[in-house]
Amino acid sequence: MDAERIRAFLLQLPHVVETAQFGGLVYWVGDKAIGGKMFAWVKLEQTDNHPRVISYPAGSERFADLLEIDGIFPAPYVARIHWVAVERWSVFRTAEWEQQLRAAYDLTLAKLPPKTRANLALPKTRQRQLIAERRKLLSSRPPKS
């Protein structure tokens, strides 16, 4: 498994949006402008003390078990909300990666507020219109100080 194969898998899941942020690719369930939530981060640059290729939410039930696997550690800054980080692609086989990331997606989708889920259920054209309206509104607000 590698970043491109992971990317292809994640983008075929319903409502997934990809953005370039935090030195990597961030995957969201739903667009951030309409309340989408991040569920995976693929790191593109190795620059800090913790080499990692991907971080994702494991959930409270699976978090401790995953930390027992060599190459998986608590994700910096977000371990308190049960995110794990993986230091190399070889930690799992392809099918296991897909299972892990589908579980992260499902966990995040289940936690979305009802309004966001309702927005995701809209027809694609209406959803795109709503996203454009929301982005315009957000860009017109003065910056927070």
Image: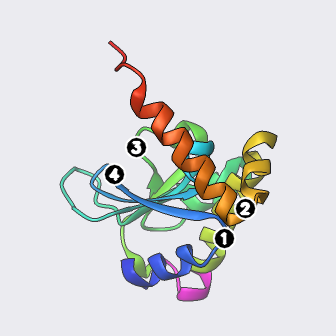
The x, y position of residue 126, in whole percent, is: 68, 56
Q: Amino acid at mark 1?
A: Arg
The x, y position of residue 80, in whole percent, is: 55, 36
Q: Amino acid at mark 2?
A: Asp
Indicate the colouring scheme: rainbow
First in sequence: mark 3 vs mark 2 = 3
Marks 2 and 1, how far apart in space? 6 Å
The local secondary structure at tag 2 comes to: helix
First in sequence: mark 1 vs mark 3 = 3
Question: Can residue 67 be found in the magenta stretch?
Answer: no
Location of the C terminus (image quadrant): top left
The local secondary structure at tag 3 comes to: loop
Marks 1 and 3, how far apart in space? 22 Å
Q: Which residue is mark 1?
A: 102
Q: Main secondary structure of the magenta part?
A: helix
> Can residue 54 be seen from the camera position used here?
yes
In percent of the image, x 80 and y 49: which residue is there? 118
Q: Amino acid at mark 4?
A: Gln
Q: Amino acid at mark 3?
A: Pro
The answer to the question of whether label 2 and label 1 lie on touching residues, with beta carbons closer than 8 A, is: yes
Q: Which residue is mark 4?
A: 21
Q: From what the image shows, is residue 9 above or below residue 100?
A: below
Q: Mark 3 packing: few (<14 Cα in 10 Å), some, or many (20+)? A: few
Residue 143, by quadrant, is: top left
140 and 63: which one is in front? 140
For the record, the magenta segment spans: 92-96
Q: Mark 1 packing: few (<14 Cα in 10 Å), some, or many (20+)? A: some
First in sequence: mark 1 vs mark 4 = 4
In percent of the image, x 59 and y 57: which residue is there? 128
What numbered label is drawn on residue 106? 2
